[in-house]
Image (spheres, helix red, strand yellow):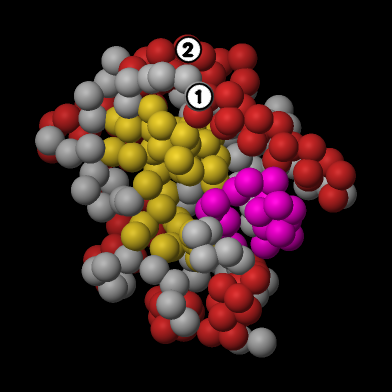
Amino acid sequence: MGIYENVLKLKNDIPEEVTLIAVSKTRSLDEMEEAYKAGVRDFGENKVQEFKDKVREFHQEIRWHFIGHLQSNKVKYLVDKVYLIHSMDRVSLLHEIEKQYKLKGKICNVLIEINIGREESKTGLLIEDLEELLLEVERCEKVKVMGLMTVIPKGDEESCRGYFREIKNIFDSLKVRKFNNISMDILSMGMTNDYKIALEEGSNIIRIGEGIFGKRTYKKQI
């Protein structure tokens, strides 16, 4: 199947209230156009420079999601261009987002990324650091936390389900608490190989790359 057909199949598979993000990192504008024609309006990027280029060249009504590790010195390039930052994972980054958005008088919607598998190779907040970050968010004026995001370790269905369930439990426990600037409306978890399990465990945003665009081909460096 092609990109168009892949999107239609996914849309048929997922509940209407779930947001489908097409992970378009390294993908061409032509490939993205196929997904757009199939109805995708949410695209996810993980490199700031590529994001900046695509924002200029692609359809204006797109909701852009920044899903990769975000360096503090790159935050200024996202102001007023990104719909949702999925990867807010440390106090220093929070402070920089607050600073840059305050300069422009804008509000930034973010998700807290949690490294639920405690993998050294992955970014994301460890659970024991969550309360400190929440406290700092409450002091902000321009940053609004909308929920949680995670990338789980690869594994079998049982282990995937366990990690997703753990995140959902954290999400639910935060949802009943009263905070300033924090609500638990969005749970972003699940990718091409595990999104069906993620949906069963409560995700309402899935991030799909290969499942839409096919396997990525990397250009060899000369």
Q: In which quarter of the view is residue 129 placed?
A: top right
Whether 207 is among the magenta residues is yes
Q: Quadrant of the C terminus?
A: bottom right
Residue 179 position in % (x across, y down): 38, 20
Q: In which quarter of the view is residue 138 placed?
A: top left
At label 2, the amino acid type is Glu
Please state which of the two labelled residues, at mark 2 or mark 1, is closer to the viewer.
1
Residue drawn at (70%, 52%) of the image = 200
* Res. 120 visible in picture: no
Q: Which residues are magenta?
A: 192-208
Residue drawn at (40%, 43%) of the image = 85
Residue 176, numbered circle: 1
Q: Which residue is mark 2?
A: 132
The CA distance from mark 2 to mark 1 is: 18 Å
Count the marks: how many? Answer: 2
Query: Does 206 appear above or below 213?
Result: above
Residue 203 position in % (x across, y down): 60, 48
Residue drawn at (28%, 38%) of the image = 108
Query: Does 187 appear above or below 193?
Result: above
Q: Is residue 147 left or right of residue 124?
A: left
Residue drawn at (41%, 32%) of the image = 183
- Residue density around tag 1, few if under 14, some if 14–19, many if 20 or more, within 10 Å: few
Whether 49 is among the magenta residues is no
Residue 44 position in % (x across, y down): 46, 58
Q: SS for tag 2? A: helix
- Do the residues under discs 2 and 1 have CB atoms within 8 angstroms? no
Question: Which of 55 and 15 lies nearest the eye of the viewer?
Answer: 15
Q: SS for tag 1? A: loop
Residue 219, numbered circle: none
Query: Does 172 appear above or below 177?
Result: below
Q: Quadrant of the N terminus?
A: bottom right
- Residue density around tag 2, few if under 14, some if 14–19, many if 20 or more, within 10 Å: few
